Amino acid sequence: MPEMNCAVAVCKNNQFKSIKEGKDVSFFTFPIDRRRKIWVLRCKRADQFNPDTFLVCSEHFTDNDFELNFKVKLVDGPTKKKLKNCGKSKAILTID
């Protein structure tokens, strides 16, 4: 089971806390393609971590990294962001 905290070194977002506080934050697993190494490097963690067991929150992506989730939109469900399934995604470029 993935950690409920964001894997990014400077981020304090937590999946359970975000839900409890009603924050509009989504959490994503690390990709298994060539982007995985880039995501790990951009998390800038001093410690070693297993990307299979951590998540990254939506605050580390740009608006262009998301696509409209029509399935949720049609049923008026809660907004859950969906990452574009595109190899050219510039995911996590906003981490300083």
Image (cartoon, rainbow, N blue to C red):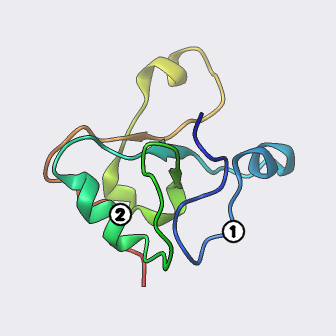
The residue sitting at 66% across, 30% down in the picture is 78
Closer to us: 68 or 34:
34
Work out whether residue 92 can be spotted: no
Query: Residue 63: image x %, image y %?
Result: 39, 58
Closer to us: 93 or 4:
4
Identity of the residue furthest to the front in this view: 48
Identity of the residue furthest to the bottom in this view: 96
The answer to whether residue 14 is left or right of residue 47 is right
What residue is shown with label 1?
12
Q: Which numbered tag is attached to residue 40?
A: 2
Identity of the residue furthest to the top in this view: 75
**In the structure shown, which secondary structural element does the residue marked by tag 1 occupy?**
loop
Query: Residue 87: image x %, image y %?
Result: 14, 47
> Which badge, 1 or 2, comes first in the chain's sequence?
1
Look at label 1 and name its amino acid: Lys
Look at label 2 and name its amino acid: Val
Identity of the residue furthest to the right in this view: 20
